[in-house]
Amino acid sequence: MSELNPPKSFIVKIASTGQEVVVEESRTILDSLERADIYPDNSCRDGICGTCETRVIAGTPDHRDMLLSDEEQAAGKTILLCVSRSHSPVLELDL
Amino acid sequence: MYVLNTWYVTAWSHEVTTTPVKRMVCEIPLVLYRNVSGQVRILEDRCPHRGYPLSAGVTHDDTIECGYHGFTFDGAGTCTRVPAQSTIPERAVVRSFPVVEKDGWIWVWTGDKSLADESQIPDTHYMNDPAWAANTHSYLFECRADLIHDNLLDLTHESFIHTSTVGDDYIYKHGITVEVEGTVVSADRLMPNVAPPPLYAKTMGLDGLFDRFHCTEFHVPNYHILHSGITGAGRPREEGYLIKVLNGITPITANTSWYYYCFARNFAIDDVQATADLQEGLATVLDEDADALRLQEIGLSTRPSNVHDVLIAQDAGVAKARRIMKQLLDAEAQFRDAAVTATSH
Ligand code: FES
Ligand code: FES
Ligand SMILES: [Fe+2]
């Protein structure tokens, strides 16, 4: 797990529709998407199982899961929506 | 789907003689036999002539003769004799498999022969080392191999399933440390200042409180070694009463598996009564697991495919291992697709 910076808000962009969803500091990406009626697959909601893993198209993820290896986290090609956040102001996801 | 480019335990040494034995590994039917010089041979268990199982035939020296019309094959699967005619058809060939026999187990390589590398077989010397006393079992488990992998990486189930032998509530109260190195996932749990498990307390001749530990080391996709034991409070593990549990997990079909098991201990190694008691106690433990996983397989059989396990923090090792398993499967599938594309051009 990366060091926990205090959570900041950012924007998630849905690649298939161009829709933008704001992720507030107090919410996860997954919660924010669900509030916008977007329902990605998920299960543990705790960064363990990988069910919510999603491809990152643009932006830099701030990984907070327990599953991805250090190399996978550094590569930043995928993100676990239930716990991880974004270093960049906008994170574009393959959804 | 199975990972095929790997070695699977397919028999105990003592099970394979000049009389052919039949096995199935990853849905591949196999016949195993020992030639006159003692080498184990493994061929696909299907005669190219008309599909009769070779395991129903007999062996002579290095060859196996089909029981139906006498086609005879050598250990490499080459046909050496067709009794009813003097020529041998070109296509009368049986697939042969690389074999390694080590420390009492016979391993078969189910994948691409050119990739078979003996050095990938794990260190199993505990089965065959005078400093360790071994109890062995082997079981048919009526479940997919994945459930056994999950079971071994998640020993919190001991608190619920193995209450009379190795279980105790304190197990699930201690968290695990998970590490990954290449394709090996380990999940380690230290339980300081606890009573030794009922199954071994007597054998160890112990009473009082100790540090108990167990570390499952899963060599994805097919083998686990558990490093467990107890040691004095705060003392190094190597000083303690040590147990190595070797688990060769071999898929038979999508919902059956063979479980090859060896429990080796470095204490009371000459104690015949302890060995006999453990043999019985460990059979109880394995029965409990076999039963639980058979039930779990039934539970899963009606679960819709869009419903997933709800993993918890104690399942971190399970999740890591599943990910590596999937990577291995994907890599093999990609390689196969590439090979198909290459040959179709
Ligand atoms: S839902 Fe399990 S890791 Fe996100
Ligand atoms: S089927 Fe084997 S010899 Fe005919
Ligand atoms: Fe068990």
Image: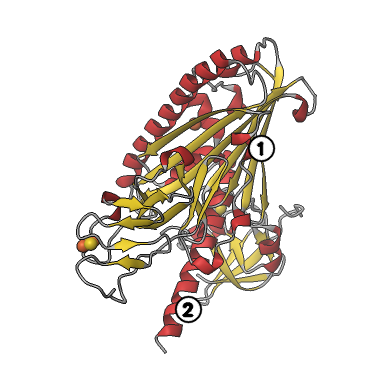
Q: Earlier in the sequence, mark 1 or mark 2?
A: 1
Residue B242 appears in the rendering: yes
Above/below status of B308 relative to B198: below
Residue A29 in percent (x, y) is at: 58, 59
- Is residue B294 left or right of B11 when viewed as pictured? left
Above/below status of B251 relative to B174: below
Question: At 64% across and 30% down in the image, what residue appears?
Answer: B228
Name the residue nearer the viewer: B239 or B295. B239
| Residue farthest toward the bottom in the current orientation of the protein | B345
Q: Which quadrant of the view contains residue B204?
A: top right
Name the residue nearer the viewer: B95 or B171. B95
Name the residue nearer the viewer: B137 or B128. B128
Mark 2: few/some/many CA within 10 Å (<14, 14-19, 20+)? few
Q: Which residue is mark 2?
A: B338
- Is residue B126 left or right of B310 when viewed as pictured? right
Q: Circle 1 marks a residue in which chain? A: B
Mark 1: few/some/many CA within 10 Å (<14, 14-19, 20+)? many
Label 1: which secondary element: strand
Question: At 68% across and 68% down in the image, what residue appears?
Answer: A75
Label 2: which secondary element: helix
Q: Which residue is mark 1?
A: B188
Residue B2 in percent (x, y) is at: 43, 57
Q: Amino acid at mark 2?
A: Ala
Above/below status of B230 relative to A13: above
Q: Quadrant of the C terminus of chain B?
A: bottom left
